[in-house]
Amino acid sequence: MAKIGKFTGRRKKTEFGESALRNRIAHDQYLERLTELAIAMFDWQNLPDTVDPRYMELALFSEGMSVFFEDEVMGFLCLKVMPDAPLNVYEIPMGRTAYAVNGYQKRLDDENSVIIYNNMLHTNSVTMVEMYATRLAELDRIVEINAQAQKTPILVQGSETQRLTLKNLYKEYAGNSPVIFGDKNLDINSLKVLKTDAPYIADKLYQLKTQIWNEALTYLGISNLNIQKKERLISDEAIRSQGGTIASRYSRLESRREAVEKINDMFGLDIKVDFRDDFRQTDDEYMIENESELEELGLKPMVQDLRTRSPIKEVRGREVVNNP
């Protein structure tokens, strides 16, 4: 997993260096946000006190696998794992070594440990999250630059000997200074200012960034339905629109459940894992259940509470009223 952090140490400031720093900060911001969302998605229940679900999910996120076993001194643990031969007929490593950053290592096998995989492909999630973070950060910087171009859409032309003077003048201009002072040696006639007339496309870029963000959430299996129009959404339409999101959950959730079943059988535990509940937001937190089909039958459509999925109101025309 790529290290998340800021540049450290003293370095000479350059235009390229500052730009690279801002690019890195934007990338790290999205990487941290998506990583945090990814490792907080699953609800582990009845885990032994010695097992840290946060560390376990980080290992699955970054390495694609972890191993659950019982240590004779510390009790049950779930750590990063180094798979080893031989493989069984399903290409699952029968040999494996649990390890930790403090130097802890324990040689294990398929008789005293269970490998937990991140998904059905046995791959990590950080690779995809890194890609989305890079794309989002790049769009962020383009939006920022395009917005700045609306403030200073100019090209300043001068001689090489005036470069430092031009930079200082531009700093005053970019800093919104009400008055810019120049010494008597400043040759104004040799300066040329050309308008670049940069088109404003930040709004379209921001819309594209939102779509990519929603694509990243869909990959993680997180609902991202956002209804802005003041029209009710038929539940069938809403469910179909979330098909990709729900399908993305299955691979990782089923991989964890399969491992949990083996762990419980091997160690006599009662561990459970499920996807944390999220919610879909509509204009009034209610959804009409099969409105079009019910209207064709001459029946009154029912409204469903998204939190309880129970029909608690009926619709008369376009008004929602309480049932008696």
Image: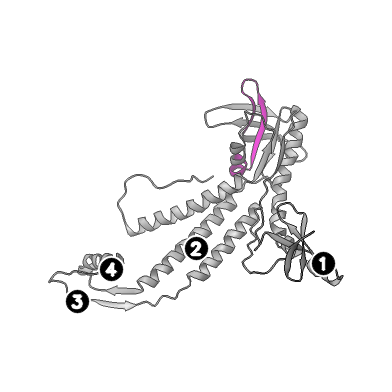
Q: Are marks 1 and 4 in contact (CB under 8 Å)?
A: no
Q: Which mark is residue 300?
A: 1
Q: Can residue 235 be seen by looking at this rendering?
A: no
Region of the chain picked out in magenta, as a range: 59-78
Q: Considering the numbered disc 3 on the image, is that residue within a helix, a strand or a loop? A: helix
Residue position marked by numbered label 2 in the rendering = 139
Instruction: Judge whether 21 appears above or below 151 on screen.
Output: above
For the residue marked with disc 4, what is the amino acid?
Tyr
Measured from the top left, where is residue 319 in percent x and y?
A: 72, 68
Q: Which residue is mark 4?
A: 173
Tell me if 222 is positioned left or right of 264 in this view. Answer: left
* Residue type beneath disc 3: Ile
Under mark 2, the amino acid is Leu
Q: Left of 161 or right of it: where is 103?
A: right
SS for tag 2?
helix
Q: Are marks 4 and 2 in contact (CB under 8 Å)?
A: no
Viewer-nearest of discs 4 and 3: 4
- Mark 4: secondary structure: helix
Q: Are marks 1 and 3 in contact (CB under 8 Å)?
A: no
Picture mark count: 4
What is the spatial separation of the Cα atoms under label 1 and label 3, in whole angstroms? Answer: 78 Å
User: Of all residues shown, which one is farthest toward the left?
Assistant: 184
Residue 202 horizontal/vertical position (percent): 48, 69
Which label's residue is closer to the chain start, 1 or 2? 2
